[in-house]
Amino acid sequence: MIATLTIARNTLIESLRQPIVLVVIAISGLLQYLNTAISAYSMGYNRVPGEVTGDDKLLFDLGLATVFLCGMLLAAFVSTATISREIENKTVLTVVSKPISRAAVVVGKFLGVGGAMVISVAVMICYLLFAMRHGVMSTASDKVDYVVITFSFGPFIASLLLAGFANFFYGWSFPQTSLTALVPLTLLGYAMTLFISPNWQFQSLGEHLKPQILITSAALCLAVLVMSAVAVAASTRLGQVMTIVVCAGAFTLGLLSNHLFARSAFTGQSYGFVRSIEPEAERYRGFDEVGDRYIMTLDGEPDFELLPGLPFRFGPSPEGAGMITPAFAPPAEDLDFSRDLYANDVPPALVITNVDGLKVTIKQIGAQPVDLRRLPERGDWCFIDHPRISWPARLAWSAIPNMQAFWLVDAVTQASEIPMSHLGLVAAYAVLQILGLLSIAVLLFEGRDVG
C-alpha cells in the first residue's frame, strides 16, 4: 500500500502540472457563462415546482453536458500523459525494476489520475452551480447577477495571480499552484453566493442551495472516474491518440447502451404503464397478504383485451428489465373466481379480477402472497408474461459502462426527487465498473514489454 500511495501521490502532482488541465477547466467555466445566454431559446415558461424550472432546465442540461464532455477529455489526456508516455519514454522502468508489482503501478496511477479528475470536476461543477444561481438571461432587460460574477471570476483571477507570484519568486509549477489554490477559493466563492442575495444582502442558506443538483453532479463525477479507469486501461497498451479514440468509443457505447443492448437483452410485451394506482381499501395498502386488492388506471387502451383471470406483472422499463414481480406460475387459463382462491393447491399469483375501461383491479391469490420487492407505483409498465432474455445482449449491456446510469438530469428537470439510496446504488455500480476495468488494465500491463 505504501508503494501504491506513493505512486498515486506522484501521479496526482504530475497530473495537476499538466497545462491542459487548467486550460480545460477555464474553457468549461467560460462555456457555463455562455450557456446562460444561449439557453433562453428553449422558451421554457413552465413553472412546475422543483429545483430547476423554465429555461433553467435547458441551462442545467447544457451545463452538466459541458462538465461531462470536458471531464471525458481530461481523463483521456491526463491518463495518457502519466502512463503511456512514461512507457514510451522508458521512465516506467525505474519503477517496475524495483520490488513493486505492476498491479500496484496500475492502481497507483489510477488513484492519482482519479484524484486529479475529482479536483478538476469539482471546480467545473462549482462553475455550473454559479451558472444555475445566475439563471438564464432570457431578455435584454434581465439584470446580471454581479454577486455571481464577483465570486466566480474573483477566485480564478486570484489563483492565477498567486500562481504567477509563486512561479516567479519560488519556481513553483504554475498550473499546479493555480489549481491547488483554485479549489478552496472556488468552493469558498460558491459558499458566499449561498448567503448573499443578488442585491448584496444576507439571505438564508436554503434560498439557492439545490441538493438535487448536488446529487446529480456527484453521479456525474462518478462517471468521470469510470471513464478515467477506461483511459488507464487503454493507455497501458496504446498511445495518446488511440487512447482518446478508445475513450470516445466507450463513451459513445455507454450513452447508447440502453438503445443498442437493453432492448435486445430483455424482450417483453407491455400493454401500458400505470397512470395512477391506489389500494381498494386502506387495509390493503401493504399489498403483502392474500386477498389484497389494488386499483390502477392505465395511461391508454391496451393493444389487446384485458380479461379477468390474466396474470399481472410490473416493472420499471417497457422491455421488462428489472421486473419487480418474481417468477410465479400463471393461474389457470379460465380462472374460476367462485372457488377458494386461497386454498393450498392454488399457487401464489397476481391476477386481474376486474376491468372497467382503463381501471383495472389486481389481487393477491394463492396459499401464500407473491413476494414483491416493492409496491406497484405510478410509471410502472404492465405485463402478462415475463420477458425473454438474450444472454449475449445482456452480457454486453452489463459489461459496457452505462453512462445513462450516471445521467440524472431528467429526474431533476421533471421535479422527481432522487433519493440518496439511488446515489448509493450508482456509486456501487461505479465501483464495480472501476474494479473490472482496473483488472483488465492489470492484465494488459502484466504482459507489456516496457524495456
Image: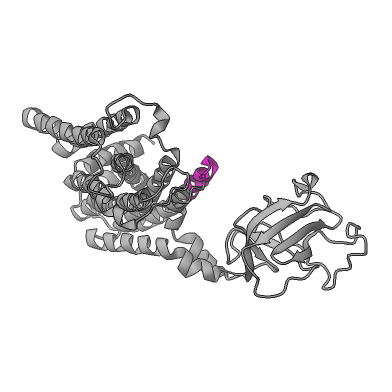
Secondary structure mainly formed by the magenta segment: helix
**Does residue 313 sit above or below 201 in this rendering?**
below
Does 70 sit left or right of 364 as displayed? left
User: Does the magenta-highlighted stretch encompass residue 451?
Assistant: no
Magenta residues (range): 417-429
Residue 91 vs residue 333, the one in the foreground = 333
| Residue 299, picture quadrant | bottom right
Does 194 sit left or right of 347 as displayed? left
At 27% from the left and 31% from the top, the residue drawn is 189
Quarter that holds the C terminus? bottom left
Q: Residue furthest right?
A: 339
Can residue 159 be seen here?
Answer: yes
Can residue 103 be seen here?
Answer: no
Q: Residue furthest front?
A: 141
**Does residue 181 sit above or below 368 in this rendering?**
above
Quarter that holds the N terminus? top left
Q: Residue furthest left?
A: 168
Residue 54: horizontal and vertical position, in percent?
39, 50
User: Does the magenta-highlighted stretch encompass residue 427?
Assistant: yes
Residue 143: horizontal and vertical position, in percent?
24, 40
Residue 208: horizontal and vertical position, in percent?
38, 35
At 18% from the left and 46% from the top, the residue drawn is 23
Residue 149: horizontal and vertical position, in percent?
22, 36
Residue 123 vs residue 239, the one in the foreground = 123
At 43% from the left and 42% from the top, the residue drawn is 51
| Residue 177, picture quadrant | top left
At 20% from the left and 43% from the top, the residue drawn is 22
